[in-house]
Amino acid sequence: MSDVPIGELAFLRKLQRLLAEGDFVATYKFALLNALADSSLEREPDNDGSLRVPVSALAEKFIEYYWPQARPYRAQGGSGFVLLQNTGRQAAVINAVAAAQAAHPTLPAARAAKLRWHTLVTKVAGTIEGMPLWKLQTVGGERDEFLYREAEFAHHTIRLLPGVPAAFRALYGLVLDAVRGAWLRQITNIAANRPVLGSSDLASFLFGSERSSLDGFRAVLRDHQGGRCLYCRKELRGAGCVDHFIAWSRYPVDLGHNLVLAHDACNAKKRDFLAYPAHLERWQLSHLERARELGERFDSLALPHDPARSRAIAWWAYEQGEAAGAHAWIDAERFVRLDGSWRGVLGAGAGRDGGALALVAERPPPAYQSE
């Protein structure tokens, strides 16, 4: 079989047809597409542009996505109802996650219970291999294996075909909007869900992360950053704002190493922009080179973190930003067009002293207002 990398336009056309014409009885296929997109951001492809992804990694993604959805949904003052994710009986993954929630109040606590977590991941992986993995690419009764091939499945691992990881990376925002929009419509169209949905904000319930939990990171980040704002380096005199270094709008997951403490004003000015490479270097020195130290603090409070994942997301975000000619935020209302200097920051780090936040690039280049 030919392994000519698929182009972005061809990928989008096939994805659009899959979402429009595919047979979706349960929501698993949407979760699988979401997991493939996220994995393409977080993992390094092979030299030929393909990417091997263990089904166990996809299973962990499923648990992450379905964790909030396995809780009772309360709308219009009702008593609560776990929304069906299948046109028939409840989806097996929802039942498995709900059982885990009965024993563990939070997802980090469930992960920490290693034996039970392994059992849960194995069970969900079995469901993925038994159902959506081989049905996802069937449209109109025909198999169109543009994402991965069943014949290449080995050792519980799939191989995303050349060009697919790159397309997921380049089109991540569009893919996520399309997949989650279709997921939302699927749940809304299940007759048993309609009485409880009313006019409530179903999207926030399904896909909104537990952002209120960010308060748990505040004390750790304050101590780790020496009581200073990561961006302006001035002392934090108030509570400070827990900010997603790579903005939530770009990658909506709360991970400890991607969170920094900043002044409210700095956070408000940075908004969803990528930070100027000087800030990126400061984050690299503080949060990635001292990842173990910071991770131990997060572990003590059962807070979610994954430094390798956070670094991979940062690389993806800056890579896409450079390609798109994005503006990088310096301070106040100053921005500069992002160039390739960020690569030297994220590609560096070995052997450097991460014991203190560096004051780098104190004289940024001439900047201009964001257009």
Image (tube, rainbow, N blue to C red):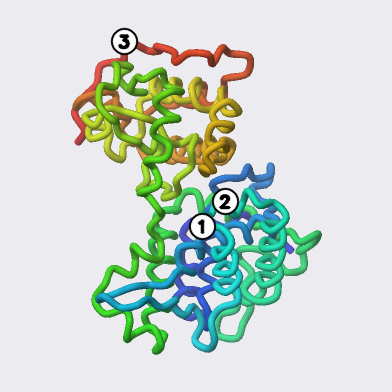
> Is 154 rendered above or below residue 371?
below
Residue in front for this viewpoint, 281 or 317: 281
Residue 198: name its quadrant: bottom left
* Residues at discs 2 and 3 in contact (Cβ within 8 Å): no
> Which of the two discs, 2 and 3, sits closer to the camera?
2
Instruction: Give the amino acid at mark 1.
Output: Pro
* Label drawn at residue 105: 1
Q: Which quadrant holds the C terminus?
A: top left
Of callouts 3 and 1, the N-terminal one: 1
Could you tell me the amino acid type at mark 2? Ala
Residue at image coords 63%, 14%: 351
User: Viewer-proximal residue, 171 or 249?
Assistant: 249
Asked if labels 2 and 1 touch by Cβ distance under 8 angstroms, the answer is: yes
Q: Position of residue 9 (x, y in %)?
A: 46, 59
Residue 203: x, y in percent?
34, 66
Q: CA gap, disc 3 to disc 1?
A: 47 Å
> How many neighbours does mark 1 have within 10 angstroms: few (below 14), some (14-19), or many (20 or more)?
few
Q: Quadrant of residue 280?
A: top left
User: In what quadrant of the picture does the N terminus appear?
Assistant: bottom right
* Residue pointed to by mark 3: 363
Taking the spot 57% from the left edge, 51% from the top edge, the residue there is: 109
Residue 265 in view in this figure: yes
Q: Would you name the residue on which mark 2 appears?
A: 109
Badge 2 marks a residue whose secondary structure is helix
Question: Which residue is pictured at 37% across the width and 46% down the height?
Answer: 248
Examine the rendered structure and indicate whether residue 48 appears above or below residue 9. Answer: above
Discs 3, 1 touching: Cβ within 8 Å? no
Q: Is residue 341 visible?
A: no
Q: Nearer the viewer, residue 144 or 332?
A: 332
Outermost residue on the right side: it is 155
Left or right: 114 as drawn, with respect to 348: right
